[in-house]
Structures are given as structure tokens and as C-alpha cells.
Amino acid sequence: MAKIIAGVGTSHTPAIGAAVDNGKAGEPYWVPLFKGYEPAKKWMAETKPDVVIMVYNDHVNAFDFKIIPTFGLGCADEFKIADEGWGARPVPVVKGYPELASHMIQSLVLDEFDMTIVNEMQVDHGLTTPMTLLFGQPKEWPCRVIPLAVNVIQYPAPTGHRCYMLGKAIKKAVEAWDEDLKVVIFGTGGMSHQIQGPRAGLVNSEFDKSFLDGLSNDPERLLRISPLEYLRDAGAEAIELVMWLMMRGALGDKVKEVYRFYHVPASSTAVGTIILESRP
Amino acid sequence: MTQKVEEYEDIPGTWVFDAQRARKGYRLNEFLYSLMKAENRKEFLADEGTYTLKFGMSEDQRQAVLNRNWNKLLELGGVSYALAKLAFTDGKSYQFMASQMTGMAEKEYVEMMLAGGRSPNGWRSKSERKGKD
């Protein structure tokens, strides 16, 4: 049986990927951030998942505004790296798992989540920055990746509660797959940040720390955070944090926090990461 | 769930990219999306005036593009991630674009971020903001 053994929450700030690609990770600005991710990377190297489910958002790269899926599940063999406007990142192509993804689609739709099936899609920094942070710079990514793209760009994003419930349905779908697989699910984006308008640069560390605590100890509390609260208190782009709640929903009731790191800034973003292992 | 547009419109210094703004910004954002292709970036930079005529955006939007009037572009329905493609086409970063939106020099903006970022205190509502800018 396939099993979701752990969840990773992490920011996906594009400047982090760019710092790695351009050999700037050793610069004083970036050293504390990459040092903070070292234990997470080590955990990942020891955990060796077979499959990653990457809950992330596209940033007007795979999807322009012709069609905006609220939940799009990538069912392709592979996903090429998008040129977001400065050339594609020099990272390996992402290998999918179409058989498992297609099984998930059937299970999720029958569980009343109206997924959009995505058979061709390029992936952007929302997916590749977390890969770089947790897996480094290998020639090939060491596992298969099922991308789950969530619309958090056009208001309203799906609610935290909806994402959490979808996470639970994902757990059920994965556990119904008859193959021994270690699956790690990522919730990406956030934490507090705003990259638009005169209020750009907003950071609310208190909000972020409380969010990390909630993931670990009391996720139900986080489900009550309204869209307005995310936007107003943690910045217009902090709504991405609903994707962390999908990750949390997929882990079951009991988790053990094995790592946490928080750092300000990466460009305009408060960066956080947390690793939660599922417990029976 | 009831939509309370006035609540999020009361957040100062912010244009929430909602469905109405997205509708108004559709052509503008499609223009910005076109800048994902290297050949389009080249064509745009060679003759911005002509290139921007191809997308059917409003004259206000087009002028805001030519002037890199970032906040105007947000107001007219541009979404920040699409606007970033215009910044990248200019060889600039998200950070540069964000600093321009705040009216700060990039260096000053970076210093604010290194000092922990902008506190939400005083920035939660337009009434809280009044008289502070």
C-alpha cells in the first residue's frame, strides 16, 4: 500500500532558486537561509520518498487567464520547466507518475472534489524552488512528482477548510493505491508576504509562528482563518498558506514535528519550513 | 459564503486581484503573458509602442505599460506575477518592481526587509492608514 509518510511546508520564493542557479547561495544575504534548510535537506536525503505530491501554485506560467483551474492535478509523464520571463531555470525536467495521478483523479472526483485534469503543463518556481531547497542540485530529481496546482492568484482562492478536506481525500486516494510507495506531500508558498502595491514588503512574524504552531498542534484552529485575515494581516500573497493546510490534511490526525525553520527575508518574503511525520 | 468586497478593498496600499479586476485586466495580462517567450520580449523591446497595440488593451493600460507605472497597472487589473514578466523583460527583479510600487529606492526597500519587513500595524485598514502617507 502507498502511504503518505510525511509532509513538508515550505516557502517557494523565486529569488531562492535564482540564488542557487546563479551561484549566490554563499553570499551573506543568503547564508542563514540555506543553513536553515540544511537539516531539512538531510532529512529528505534519509527519507528517500518514491513520490512527492507537490501542492503549489502556478504564477501565470502554465495557466494564463484563458482557463483558471482551482485545483489542477498534473497527470503527465513529465513536466518541463517554464521560462517565466528570464529564461527557464537550469533544473532537471520533472518526472510525473501518470498512473498514480490518474488513480487520484478518479478517487478525488468520486469523493466530490471536482479536479481539473492537466495532461500537459510546464512548471514554474512554485514547484521548482521547493525541489531545489529539499533536494539540492542533482542531475535528475531522485523521485517522481505529482504536481497539484491551486489557484491562489485570482481571488478567491479555495478556503483553508476546503484545502484541508481535499488533503484528507488525497490521503485516502493514496492509501488505496496497491503498490508499496513512500509518499511525501509538500504544501508550498507563503509565509507572510506582499509583493504588490505601496504595502509591499509586509511581514507578520507573529502570524507565521502561530501558523506553524497550529500545523503541529491544532490545525483545526487554522481552518477558521478567513480569506480576509490572510490578506489583511499577513499580506496579499500570504493566502498561499492554504496550500500548507492541504498538506496537513493529508497527514491524518497525529503528526510529529521533526523540523522547523523561520527566516526573514528572501526578497519580499518571510520564509518558513516545517516537516511533519505522520503517526498512526 | 457572502462576498464582502468592501472589506478587502479597505486594505490600504493593496489591489486585491478579484474577479472584477481580472475581467478588466484580461487583455493587459494576456499581453504580459506573451513576454514569457524570448522572441516576444525581443519584439516588444525593439518597438514597445507597436507591440502593445496588438493585444486590445485599453489606452490607459497601454500608457501605464509604456511608463512602467506599476501601481496604475495593478489598479487597471494587472496581476503582480504577470507584471513581473515586464520587470524581467527589463532585466529587473521582483524586488525591484516591489520597491517601485512602494515608492522606495531598491536599497532602502532591501534594508526594510533585512530589518524584518513592513509591520502590519498601521496598514490593516484605510482608516488606520489615514494621515500616515
Image (spheres, helix red, strand yellow):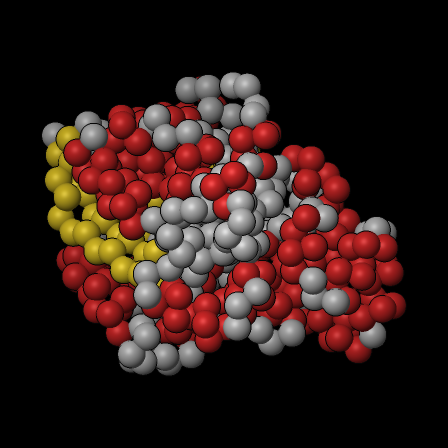
- The residue closer to the viewer here, A143 or B132, is B132
Q: How many marks?
A: 0
At x 37%, y 80%, the residue is: A23
Q: Position of residue B114 (x, y in %)?
A: 34, 68
In the image, A43: left or right of B85?
Answer: left
Q: Dividing the image into 4 quarters, which one contains the C terminus of chain B?
A: bottom right
Q: In this orientation, does residue B98 appear? A: yes
Q: Quadrant of residue A165?
A: top left
Height in image: A99 above or below A195?
Answer: above
At x 12%, y 30%, the residue is: A280
- The residue closer to the viewer here, A275 or A49, is A275
At x 31%, y 73%, the residue is: A30
- The residue closer to the viewer here, A32 or A88, is A32
In the image, A257: left or right of A65?
Answer: left
Height in image: A179 above or below A110?
Answer: below
Q: Quadrant of residue A140?
A: bottom left
Q: Position of residue A155 (x, y in %)?
A: 56, 36
As drawn, the residue found furthest toward the front would be: B131
In the image, B117: left or right of A278?
Answer: right
At x 47%, y 41%, the residue is: B128
Q: Position of residue B73 (x, y in %)?
A: 69, 55
In the image, B106: left or right of A219?
Answer: right
Q: In this orientation, does residue A87 appear? A: no
- The residue closer to the viewer here, A216 or A234, is A234
Q: Position of residue A220 (x, y in %)?
A: 27, 26
